[in-house]
Image (spheres, rainbow, N blue to C red):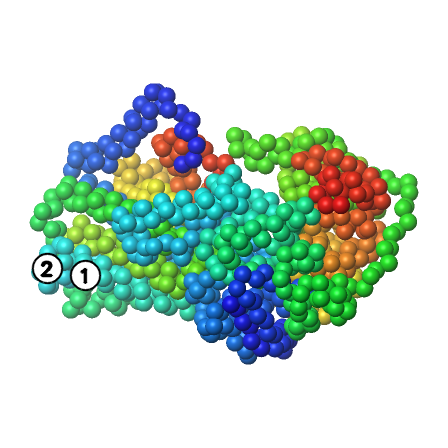
Amino acid sequence: MLEVDGCSVSFGGVRALRDISLIVSELEIVGIIGPNGAGKTTLFDVINGFRRPDAGRVRFRGVDITDLPAHQRAAAGMARAFQNVGLIRGVTVRANLLAAEHLAAHYSASAGILGLPATWSDERRLSRRAETLAEILGLTYVLDRTVDGLPYGILKHIELAAVLATDPDLVLLDEPTSGMGPGETAAFADTLLELRRTFQVTILMIEHNVPFVSKVCDHVYCLDFGETLAAGKPEEVRANPKVVEAYLGKDEASRRLAARTSREPLVVVDDLQVSYGTGQHRSPPVLRDLSFEVLEGERLVLLGLNGAGKTTTLATLAGLLRPDRGSILFAGRDITDLPAAERVALGITLVPEGRQVFPGLSVEHNLRLGAWMHRHDAHQVAECRDRVRRLFPRLARRGWQRAGTLSGGEQQMLAIGRALMASPRLLLIDEASLGLSPAISRAVFKMIDEINADGVTVVLVEQGTAALGHADRALILERGRIVHRGTSAETDHASLRERYLGTPV
Amino acid sequence: MNGAPPTTSAGGRAARGAVVAGLAGLVLVFPLTRSGIEVNVYTEAVIYAIIGLSLNVLVGYAGQISLGHQAFVGIGAFTAAYVTTVHEQNFVAAIGVTMLVGAAQALLLGLVSLRITGLYFALVTLTYGTMAESSLFNITSLTGGAAGQAAPKPAAFASDHRYYFLCLAFLAVVLYVDWRLTATKAGRALLAIRQDRRVAASFGADLKRYTLIAFMVSGVFASVAGALLAYNTGSVVAGQFTFQLALVFVIMTVVGGLRSRAGVVVGSAFFALTGFLFDKLHLASAVSAIPLLPDLPADLAPLVLGPLLLLFTLTRHPGGFGELLRPIGRWLRAAPPADRPAGARVESHA
């Protein structure tokens, strides 16, 4: 059905893809794995027409589509989901699905604009079709909500509904399970198999979650440095020593810092209640009766499923949300009503979910913006920058590269580096491992350990339990309440995992 | 909208009926009681509403900018006058030709927008407008030169009052087309393109095609408005279509509220009426009573008021008049309030 034949792409002097060939047959589910920066997303861009390969051809159902623009490939039956969720922001889920039905409309654009009678009935049909799709994916209850502010896991499902709305034969999914908890991932595997049967679609996906890939894929390609490292049945690829080396990373001795004792609380959160919106638009509380302490110098991790209130907790600590009730003390001072900017000055810095680097600016400029507080003190800026460069040698080498062209792992490092430029005392990191391969997430966590060893207190938010090895204590949130608190060792317990994090045992 | 209306009490229905009747009375009956000269001003307000909607298609839907919209309107005005006076054609033919010319000139500019974007394209539109104003509109054989071109009203609508209702009918058609544009696939394609062109392409929406469609729809609206403006004053002169006018067009659309039909209509009509209201309310004397303030001619009122309102819109109400009108509209439709305040977070860029 899809045939990529010897495609190469280079950016400037860097070969992003080198002579890649790939075949996807009708109704297959094919996985592409590989470390961040291996060229997987670039390959998707070549397949769906966002990037013209320097060499090689792409054939779809035997037709050479190498020179076809992306929207015509969509019309030919190729749909794509994006790494950071390809939805239209600022409008409802319904509007998104209707927009995705662009190709399903039977009338011409001008007939629609003139409001001819036939277009009215076709609009009703499209509307029903969108509702049916939403029903199939269990999204009926969010149809009239704006997509902004919906949890990441739900956005991924909406995107899938939008992709199906284009009536595709081949679906390209870019890291579909990123941001999902283990339980959700397991359920999603069944959803995919079900969708293949009911919609008769062929699926090609980029994915980091190797167990997930093994479960659903018929065939797997492993990419590294723009080349195909291995291809074959999932279990063959998984066992390939080259793949193990490049992708899964060397088995790291679990390094756990000795528990340091007798520390003062840096943050005291007391009886916090937080909701979104104001006045009559106020949501029910997202956080309730939340009380906890963060000790000076410790690494605390907040765990929980999507929608548990982890990000809200961090946003409230950073001052982006004002609590309805309760108080926050920082180093003995009541900061409950302090605006976010002043909290940065006190030493509280947030690394937001999804990295949020400034894509059009260079690495260097991103870092300088992080030092906004020290803008009148060139010496201080230089000192912070040297520290970041020491911690992240990869960033130092890419000083003038545009941040948007960095790989996901490098962007995450940049986001953390940028936060360090404000010389924080408390670093809040939201889902550092989101969308990163296991080896790269481990590298990022190791950096966080080093930052912590320098005396910075760290609060992490994570979905998976991988971060437990890099934390002293853990809190588990469920529906806005703390349901468990303990040391990492106590938390890393099968019964807790199953109960609150949905990991099948 | 969704869900059951919260207020369906007899009192609620009566109150809504009274408001609708009041609005209808203001638009349909009140002008009948005024003099022809005054009705001309109201007609102009209706035409400005069409111009506002034209700009809204470009700026609001397509995310493009036009700082040369006086050319769009002016070309429509001169085309209509030329066809009517020089070729002695009837109104229907004149409007038809005007729409074609309006679409064609917008298409040209649209083709440029596919190659040049952002600030540079804004400069192109600005140049286009001033070029039309200073050279195109001074080609004597087409526009009558400095004396201008006569544009008598169509015989059936020769009275100022009848003409007012003709323009109102055109506004109704434009509103219908604009509504269907946003409610069908073209509008949704533009929405997707404006927000994220990669996502739009993955949905199968062709950026080039829909951008050009938006330009042409905007061009047709603007040229029809230009034609109506020409007949309203009875003649067209090049000096009417200055850069200041283009600025007022942009300001009235933004202050009205991009992507809000009601907001744009109210905002545009408001700006068309400022000079008139300024006179009526004797604001000029009130302003000149303030020491150190220079005397302000009434026709400059929009240009002084505009930036002030624009500043207010940008800082306090990104949704413009439209955002302020939304609760009223919702109440009139007896629909429940939205789950969050619209305007502020929703698409505050573009």
Give me the disc on residue B97. Answer: 1
Count of numbered marks = 2
The image shows residue B114 at horizontal and vertical percentages of 40, 67
Callout 1: helix, strand or loop?
helix
- Chain of the residue that carries numbered disc 2 in the rendered image: B
| CB-based contact (under 8 Å), mark 2 and mark 1 | yes
The image shows residue B287 at horizontal and vertical percentages of 35, 40
The one of A214 and A366 positioned closer to us in this rendering: A214
Residue on which the image places disc 2:
B89
- Chain of the residue that carries numbered disc 1 in the rendered image: B
The image shows residue A492 at horizontal and vertical percentages of 81, 45
The image shows residue A202 at horizontal and vertical percentages of 53, 60
Residue displayed at 49% across by 69% down: A60
The one of A233 and B186 positioned closer to us in this rendering: A233
Give me the disc on residue A96. Answer: none
Going from N to C along the chain, the mark reached first, 2 or 1, is 2
Q: Quadrant of the N terminus of chain B?
A: top left
Which picture quadrant has residue A183?
Answer: top right
The amino acid type found where label 2 is placed reads Gln
